Image (cartoon, helix red, strand yellow):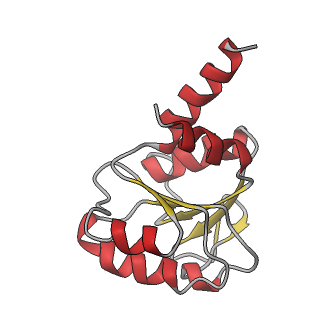
Amino acid sequence: MNELACEILHSARRVAVLGMSPKPQRTSHDIALYLQRVGYEIVPVNPGHEAILGLPCFPALARITGAVDIVDVFRAAEHEDEVAADILAMHHRPKAVWFQLNAGGYGVEDQLREAGIEVFLDSCIKVVHSICNNRSRSHM
């Protein structure tokens, strides 16, 4: 397990969920609810909706007001260039970007890292958070 991932998750407070769905059966919805339950502020990003989970939904990352610590990506891999451009256009760049399973990111990883953003590829933020949380409990 990546110690840096645990450090970022421990210090993060606000997570933008890019491609969040309002449908409860969708993975993006389930993971956003999990993140919300464990204490993160969720910022839905989906141009097709004005609100999700009663939260204002932004049409693009660059339209988010204030800073986010993490961008959690739920977009198909073929959109990774557009995702990277959106992340780099943010007024306050995140500490990290999580490309969920099958969300790509391999072609833009270097570009994002050069901009000072940590990148996690083919990685479920919910699983990583759970592992980090369990590990910190076992060290008590």
Q: In this rendering, does residue 21 appear at all?
A: no
Between residues 34 and 114, which one lies in front from this camera angle? 114
Image spot of residue 8 (x, y percent)? 63, 48
Image spot of residue 33 (x, y percent)? 62, 45
Task: Name the quadrant containing residue 84.
Answer: bottom left
Q: Is residue 114 above or below residue 16?
A: below
Image spot of residue 79 (x, y percent)? 30, 74
Residue at 23%, 71% (x, y): give it: 78
Q: Is residue 115 above or below residue 62?
A: above
Q: Count the marks: how many?
A: 0
Q: In the drawing, does residue 82 fall left or right of residue 135? A: left
Q: In this rendering, does residue 127 appear at all?
A: yes
Q: Is residue 58 above or below residue 43?
A: below
Between residues 103 and 55, which one lies in front from this camera angle? 103
Residue at 63%, 77% (x, y): give it: 50
Residue at 29%, 64% (x, y): give it: 76
Task: Name the quadrant containing residue 49.
Answer: bottom right
Task: Name the quadrant containing residue 140.
Answer: top right
Residue at 53%, 51% (x, y): give it: 29
Between residues 126 and 87, which one lies in front from this camera angle? 87
Image spot of residue 103 (x, y percent)? 32, 58
